[in-house]
Amino acid sequence: MISRWEKIFLGLSVLLAAATGLTYAWMKFFMKTADPISVVNHPWQPVVLSAHVLAAPWLLFALGLIARDHILGRFRDPRSGKARPSGLLGVLAMVPMVATGYLTQVLTSAEGRRTMGLVHLGAGLGFLAAYGYHVRWRGRRAAADGHGEEESAAPGSVEPRAGPAAGSEGSRRLPLT
């Protein structure tokens, strides 16, 4: 179960990393400078790259916050819902995204940096697609199940994963101890 603030923090860090990464990719691969000796295609390109490099650790931290309870916990739980494939795809895309993000910064050859940058872009797009689908699927599934997200739960409690339907006479919140 992800708390409300973890969802907000994760969502904002994904948004910030994706916005800066996609903006940088657009500037690097799709814009062309009129200056033949310029190494950047847009004057803001270095600033956007720096913003992306500074946003990425926040995303990694946010993913680390949910790793034990949500990612590993749901992976081990046989009762996990239909959102599991998109979550697994997101995790599988996250590994090369993080690895190539670091490798891009430390490689010295231009061809190596370009290759890692393109793999990083592809893995980042894969992660973004899987994350978007995962979040969208979870919201639709919660609405279809007839109950909201966990922010309706009492502080310090979790909703049971199996058992009576939410709102029925036998449903109750389990304390976290």
Image (cartoon, rainbow, N blue to C red):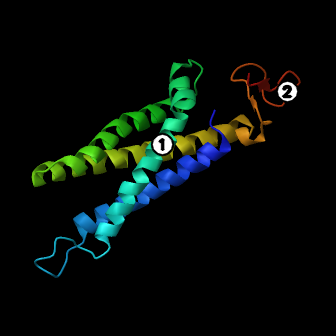
Please, what secondary structure does the residue beneath circle 1 have? helix
Where in the figure is residue 116, as x and y percent of width and height?
21, 47
32 relative to 93, above or below: below
Rendered position, 142 above or below 157: below
Write down the quadrant of residue 73 in the picture.
top right
- Please provide percent x and percent y for residue 26: 30, 65
Q: Residue at x 56, y 41 (%)?
A: 137
Say which residue label 2 marks: 168
Foreground mark, 1 or 2, reads: 1
Callout 1 amino acid: Phe
| Quadrant where the N terminus is found in the figure | top right
Mark 2 residue element: loop
Closer to the chain start, of discs 1 and 2, is 1
Give the residue drawn at x 24%, y 72%.
31
Q: Residue at x 73, y 42 (%)?
A: 151
Quadrant location, the C terminus: top right
| Residue bearing the label numbered 1 | 61
Callout count: 2
Position of 51 compared to 84: left or right?
Answer: left
How far from the left and from the top, in percent, is residue 94? 38, 39
What numbered label is drawn on residue 81? Answer: none
Write down the quadrant of residue 34 in the picture. Answer: bottom left
